[in-house]
Image (spheres, rainbow, N blue to C red):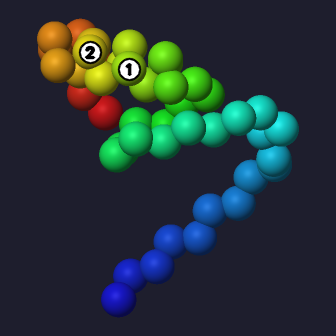
Amino acid sequence: MKTILLAARPLHEPVTQYGSFVMNTKEAIKRDIEDYRLGRLTEV
């Protein structure tokens, strides 16, 4: 089993997640999913 531990300061803002998409709002996730479907996101 492999484990990864991440730590950071609290954001103090909303976080919304859908699959591998994590943003501040549902609208931002919808926009990014559409960009992904249209091939407008770059490779990571």
User: Eyeballing the image, is 33 above or below 19?
Assistant: above
Q: Position of residue 5 (x, y in %)?
A: 59, 70
Question: Type of residue at label 2?
Answer: Glu
The residue shown at (62%, 62%) is 6
Q: Are marks 1 and 2 in contact (CB under 8 Å)?
A: yes
The answer to whether residue 6 is left or right of residue 12 is left
- In what quadrant of the picture does the N terminus appear? bottom left
Which residue is label 2 attached to? Answer: 34
Mark 2 secondary-structure assignment: helix
The residue shown at (81%, 47%) is 10
- In what quadrant of the picture does the C terminus appear? top left
Which residue is label 1 attached to? Answer: 30
What is the distance, in whole Å, between disc 1 and disc 2 at their CAs?
6 Å
**Furthest residue in direction left, as rendered:** 38
* Image quadrant assignment for residue 39: top left
**Furthest residue in direction bottom, as rendered:** 1
The answer to whether residue 6 is left or right of residue 37 is right
Classify mark 1: residues with Cα within 10 Å, few (<14), some (14-19) or many (20+). some
